[in-house]
Amino acid sequence: MPLHVGCAQWTHPAWPQPSREKLRSYASWCNAVESNTTFYATPSVSSVAHWAEQTPPDFRFVVKLPQVISHERRLTNVDAELREFVAAVEPLGPRNHALWIQLPAAFSPTDLGTLAAFLHHAPREFRYAVEVRHRAFFEDPSAAANLERVLARANAEWVPFDTGTLFGRRPTSLAERDAWMKKPRVARRTRALTGHPIVRYIGRDSVDETVEGWSYLVDLVVNWLSEGRSPTVFLHTPDNAEALNLARRFHATVAAIVPSLAPLAEPVATEPPTLF
């Protein structure tokens, strides 16, 4: 089974990218991306079609539902908004790996009925991945078990955001300090519910610390691959400047253990800077 790796964005000032078609360039480095921009607004169909044109058929988008659905309406009375969103992302076709439901920290175990009803009525042609941030889901075994039952009924995946390395020691930069303020501090989760697990991992400014912290994840992914699962791993750092290289390094580390793993593409060359 393939391993897909990617970042939280497809463009960054520190990355070697051309001035145009940055997504096409990114897709030669990584084979997956978190589509975070869709959280803020539903994109136009033409924009999504352009995304599809710049990526190969086996590229994976994990597309975040708009905040009006997940945060403002809290998954209630959102049929029209959901229909509009799934119509907008239709041009992605098989590239649309999962609809990502990132729930607010206030979404607690008492809200599981709402999540169950949403997943029950959601279009069945899509795969769903749910990220929760309420601490009870990570600290109360019964709350975790109840969430897993809700997800299992819809064949949906639980997306962990692993911040263990980030919070392993106090911040040493402004970027790390900002991440400490904004990222959830929850227990590490290693259990996959479906054949398509998704992990979001954030390290630190230090590449060495980031790589050291992901050793458990390498072992986990190797095991998932041996079980026939097809994982997707997203690599973050506080400022994401090194995330592109780290994603490829993670894939290479797994490939050294699993030689049959399909290689990533060779990055496309970027045009040299010009004066005009």
Image (spheres, rainbow, N blue to C red):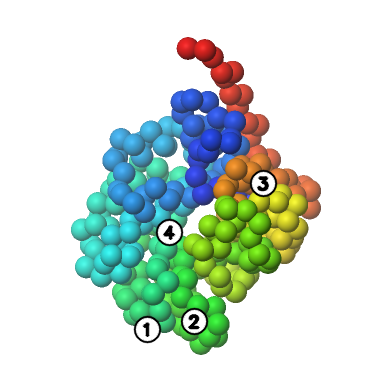
Q: Disc 2 on helix, strand or loop?
A: helix
User: Identity of the amino acid at label 3?
Assistant: Leu
Q: Nearer the viewer, mark 4 or mark 3?
A: 3
**Marks 1 & 4, CB-CB < 8 Å contact:** no
Label ID, residue 136: 2
Label ID, residue 110: 1
On the image, the x and y values in percent for residue 251 come to 68, 47
Residue at coordinates 31% horizontally, 44% vertically from top-left? 43
Give the mark nearest the N terminus, 4 or 3.
Answer: 4
On the image, the x and y values in percent for residue 103 come to 40, 67
3D distance between C-alphas at marks 1 and 3:
38 Å
Q: Is residue 49 left or right of residue 133?
A: left
Give the mark nearest the N terminus, 1 or 2.
Answer: 1
Q: Nearer the viewer, mark 4 or mark 2?
A: 2
**Marks 2 & 3, CB-CB < 8 Å contact:** no
3D distance between C-alphas at marks 2 and 3:
31 Å
Q: Disc 3 on helix, strand or loop?
A: helix
User: Identity of the amino acid at label 1?
Assistant: Thr
Specify whether residue 275 is in view: yes
Q: Nearer the viewer, mark 1 or mark 4?
A: 1
Q: Disc 4 on helix, strand or loop?
A: strand
Give the mark nearest the N terminus, 1 or 4.
Answer: 4
User: Identity of the amino acid at label 4?
Assistant: Trp
Q: Is residue 212 left or right of residue 174?
A: right
Q: Is residue 187 above or below residue 65?
A: below
Q: Is residue 261 above or below residue 179?
A: above
3D distance between C-alphas at marks 4 and 3:
23 Å
Residue on which the image places disc 4: 100
Q: Disc 1 on helix, strand or loop?
A: helix
User: Identity of the amino acid at label 2?
Assistant: Ala
